[in-house]
Amino acid sequence: MGGNMRKMINCWMVLFRLFIFTSVLSTTDKTDAKASFKQCETTIKNWASSSQEFEVFEDQKTLKDLLFFLHVPRTGGNNYFHCFLGQLYDPSSKCPLSYDELRFDPRNPGCNLTVTHDDYSLMSKLPYDKTSVVTVIRNPVDRVFSSYEFSVEVAARSLMFPNLTYATEMANRRPVSVEKLGGNTLDIWPWKFLVPWMIEDLFARKNMREVKGENLIKTNEPYNMGDIVMPLHQFINEPIALDLVHNGATFQVAGLTNNSYSKVSDDVRNCVLKYHTLGEYVLEVAKRRLDGMLYIGLTDKHKESAALFASVVGDQVISKLAQSRLGVNGSTINHSKHIDPFRNSSSKRETTRKLVKLYETCIQRSLESQRQRRASSVKYIAPVNFTKESRHQVPRRIIDEISALNNLDMQLYEYAQLIFEKQKQRGSKKVITEVMSYGMLNALYVTSWKHLPFALPFLVLLPFIFIYLSGRKKRSKSKL
């Protein structure tokens, strides 16, 4: 009896000690978590405070000596650079293309225009008091779609090779003209991380199909063909997407990408990924930096953005370059042939219209080139083919998940829209409105199908109106 009692007491003692040990561990974990949060909060607050050092916003709406185009990936920035700024600045005024690495002395650029995927931290290397910044912001959901599609598209080209080893070897062979091009896609952030990762995934799925011996595609939804490409719903939850894609605009404008010149960028970004509420500090810095930019465009308001860009930025570039052509004694320096078509414009309206016309012609060629390149890539992953129509097949829950994962970007996008409206008010609204009515810019990026039912009756009546007017013209001629 006594032995059983001792065993029972020992058993209770063990359970009691286990309970105490577990309680201590739980308390320790909570204490550690609290300390970790406080440490992260301190790190982010210190960064936010020091970030103001490179924010010189006096007279920010006047173009300065150096124009820094902060190119957020998949926002149409290439078109702005090649079809607007590339037409205005002559080669000697452009900084060497530096998408993969800086190819000029940032403290003494000796040039007037740089475009790069570098984040805002590049300003710490530039003469920031003599630098203007412009950027373009896109609807975050559309930007995530585009990032996924582009990663798959570029990676799909590797499927022309028999295996991953050979594809990797060929990808590492840099073109001779890479410095002239500013780097190839596999050297440029963030694609230098996303594309190789996607290439490995494509070959893994290809090998699995060959092992199974199955070629039957079980779905007609391009964003969910898991036998061929990584489904969208998987992509958005991958750690690499969380780090490089989601809230990418906010982190880039704040200067906190994994491609940053800031020494604390990784610590701050990891803290935000761990404690989402701390992202508000980063968002406030990003908003403040948008406020200090010369121009902010919106991808989904492409036509208005193009007219506003031409009016706000283009007109100042032309004036500045024209002044730089005058020598010390008033003699003309043959500095730029690019501005000659605009020098004789009689008004700002005419200058803006000429710029938009030039842009329209250029962008049509650019978009056609992109379509051809996309077609040559997706043939390796047929029947996968990403279109605007197929996006509508993606379930609403995935769209909502993308929005939630990009909470900071959604707020930054809303703020950018407010700034955009203010820019229109500050600029010559009449000029922008008139230029918007010129050309076919709306059809280049977005077709507004919701207006089609209202336009359809007029389209049907159009031939009859033409016949009627032609008849009247003939009758008037017979009277004469």
Image: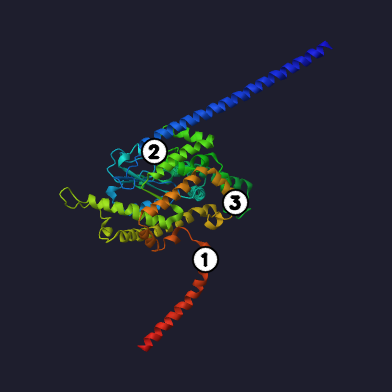
* Residue pointed to by mark 3: 396
Q: Residues within 10 Å of mark 1 (few under 14, many from 20)?
A: few
**Could you tell which of marks 1 and 2 lies nearer the N-terminus?**
2
- Residue furthest toward the bottom? 479
The alpha-carbon separation of the residues under discs 1 and 3 comes to 24 Å
Q: Looking at the picture, does residue 397 appear above or below residue 259?
A: below
Percent position of residue 457, x then y: 52, 72
Number of callouts in the render?
Answer: 3
- Residue furthest toward the left? 329
Q: Quadrant of the N terminus?
A: top right
- The disc placed on residue 118 is none
Most foreground residue, 33 or 379: 33
Determine the secondary structure under disc 2.
helix
Left or right of 285, for residue 322: left
* Residue pointed to by mark 2: 121
Left or right of 176, for residue 390: right
Determine the secondary structure under disc 1.
helix
The alpha-carbon separation of the residues under discs 2 and 3 comes to 36 Å
Residue type highlighted by circle 2:
Ser
* Residue pointed to by mark 1: 452
Most foreground residue, 251 or 233: 251
Q: Contact, CB < 8 Å: mark 1 with mark 3?
A: no
Residue type highlighted by circle 3:
Arg
- Any part of residue 169 in sight: no
